[in-house]
Image: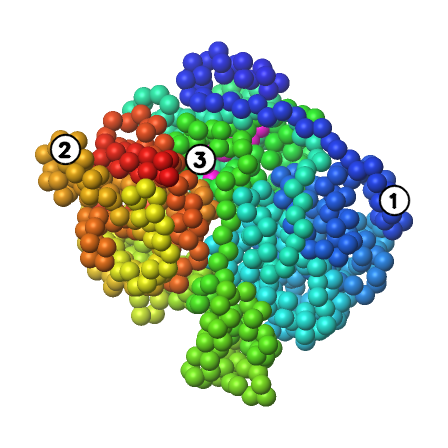
Amino acid sequence: MITDILEYFENKKWYRDRIEHIEEIPPRRARYTTSKLNLPVELEEYLKNHNIKLYTHQYETLKHVRNKENVIITTPTASGKTLSFSLPVLEDLTNNKEDTALYIYPTKALANDQLKSILSIDKECDLGINPAKYDGDTPKSERPEIKRTSRLVITNPYELHLILPWHKQWQRFFENIKYVIIDEAHQYRGVFGSNMAFLIRRLKRICKHYGSHPQFIISTATLANPVEFGEKLTGVKSHIITENGSPAGKKYFMFFNPYAIESKNPSIHQDTQKLFNTFIEKDLQTICFEISRKMAEVVALRSKNELKKTRPDLIENITAYRAGYTVDERKKIEDDLKKGKIRGIVTTNALELGINIGSLDSVIISGYPGTLISTWQQAGRAGRSNQESIITMIAFQNPLDQYFMKHPELFFTNSHEHAIIDLNNQEILRGHLKCAAYELPIKFSETDSFGFDDQGVVFDEISEMETDDILTYKHDQWSYNQKDMDDNPNFKVNLSDISSDTYNVFNGRSFLESMSQKQAFREAHENAVLIHNGETYIVKELDISERRVYVKKKDLDYYTQALKEVDVKIIKKLKETTMGNIKISYANLNVTEIYNRYNVIHYSKIIASKKLTLPPLNFKTNGFYFTIPYAIKEELEEFLVSDDKFNDLFRGCLQGVQNVILSVAPFHVMCDSYDLGGVTKNMHEDTMNATIFIYDGFEGGVGLSQKAFKLFKDIIKMSYELVKDCDCESGCPACIYSSQQQTDDKFLNKEGTLLILKRLYENIAEN
């Protein structure tokens, strides 16, 4: 079936001209353990009744967990990781009637899916574990019974964060806790990951208080640094399991590029919808991942309209799926998908993670989803154990998408992505120390247990909070100084951000969402177009003093982009390295960002540019910087011929280099492009040279630029190849234009940018 459609594509010029690469991923045979399992009778019977044989990696996990080791499982999507970690837990809870286990999932949907699976085993085997989900949706009437009887509780980080102050109500559970399972752990990176790491340390404190020391089992997608990542997340040494014994059918991975041919108006979404319909009409059950809720709905609707002409019998078998649907709506769609009633579904990344929807014939990924992990998670939706499948990734006109079209080999080698957890952000530490002191007084001996590289910093933060009357020192321990009954620091610490200074967005009296101050300045300034749940709103007022945004719903065919000017001061140089005659430094920085203009954009054209009057955002962070040798500047002056003044031209070349680095660095350090910032100066007062800065866009930094500093060679190599391989003449959104689109790019120069990158790359290659 798949070979037929590939032949069809080869014979049709429209498809053939846009296909950049097809990778054949060979099938994989199952490898089962031959060892005797020695499980409790109930579980042995369950496996037998369901014809389940353990893959080699599942048995390896069982063996190491039985051996009291902490475990990190990094096998691919759809390899049976859930059974890997659940089997040893269920074995223990069957044999030891008091033992308990905690499962932590990043989303409620995943928690719901896991609960169904474990409830089924518990009921069929009559294990008496009474598994339950405990989160914000759990009815109050059910909560006391869960605390009293459940031995396996499934929750998410946000709920755990609020549960910990009430640990006395959970005494039975914490006294007997033997396992903490962290599934989809790669979701915990950047700011969220740093907060999660401190949350886990607070959980361990509570467990220790009740005399328990649980084992940790982490399940994650493939990473370049799984051991470093896992141990930073939990603070415990772990055994890693990478060998994969699960089977897979043959896969064809197709790279489809609407920009591979010259066209006045290439449309990614129209191409996506055309491919989607082609697969469905060829009888392939297909899932399409779109970049937004709105586009998921639009593509599904357009698909139905087209099918009215060609296959009206399929119209009722097409649907969209996104957050915002009711639980019952989503459950029906998931069930119909599993049963094959739905032949085509268009979704956001809501179906990317391990929700059980069965296995499909075809996956379309409309736009690189930001990380290789997400790409493979989405691709993993296709192909049963012996069934061929096809994955199609459609490229947008941005640097990373287009780079991968020219370098598909990056997808099919070991992971290059590093998941970053930084435990050295004092702002995050301070928030969690308040929460910890509120939950249980902090003893002096515990100041080394928060994972901070410098124990003295932990003590300094505690001392400062004591001076500020936030903590009270009494009986050799620090307690939280609660000002009133509503003073709960856990409500003030946001796990998804560093700052607690959030802005709330209102449409009339209806609350829409919360956002950070930087996001508010960027996306919710006065007259900005704010997109929420696929709907457009015009911002009527940004009230900085009250941290509120007032919007009005309005159908708009344009959008806005805020522009900023950035100034950077070097506070303290921390590290320095030299590659040839290029000097790269890592330092504490003081950053000032001023959002001073915004563009109004209609169908990719700037139709107006207007002034903004917002106060400057000033924050201390970490970042790396490097200077451009004078010889390169001289070469540029001789090489470039232009009517522009050389200073403007030079600035445009430096700006191009910065833009490309900011485009490719997120691939290496697994972050959103807005998590990093950058600035270039023809002559910076602290270096007295032409300088490019790349910094963490968060107060105190979260380790992203530090990892990028270490991976500087890889980033420059990729940046050079990206610009060199781009077919455009003078620069475009696929190479040197800003992926963040927050700077004025009018002096950008592709020739000069490429020359600088080439010389940097030559220095690195020689080094």
Q: Dot 1 corresponds to which residue?
A: 45
Q: CA distance from mark 3 to mark 2?
A: 39 Å
Q: Which of label 1 and label 2 is nearer to you?
A: 2
Residue 589's quadrant in the figure? bottom left
Residue in the foreground of this view, choosing between 706 and 696: 706
Q: Earlier in the sequence, mark 1 or mark 2?
A: 1
Q: Earlier in the sequence, mark 1 or mark 3?
A: 1
Q: Quadrant of the N terminus?
A: top right
- Pointer 3: residues within 10 angstroms few (<14), some, or many (20+)? many
Q: CA distance from mark 1 to mark 3?
A: 45 Å
Q: Position of residue 713 (x, y in %)?
A: 39, 41
The stretch in magenta equals: 362-369
> How many numbered discs, if any?
3
Q: Dot 3 corresponds to which residue?
A: 367
Q: Dot 2 corresponds to which residue?
A: 638
Residue lying at the far right in this picture: please name it: 41
Mark seen at residue 674? none
Q: Quadrant of the C terminus?
A: top left
Q: Amino acid at mark 2?
A: Glu
Q: Amino acid at mark 1?
A: Glu
Q: Amino acid at mark 3?
A: Gly
Residue 750's quadrant in the figure? top left
Q: Earlier in the sequence, mark 3 or mark 2?
A: 3
Residue 757's place in the image compared with 266, above or below, is below
Magenta run includes residue 364 = yes
Residue in the foreground of this view, choosing between 29 and 375: 29
Residue at the spot 50% in from the left edge and 82% down from the top edge: 471
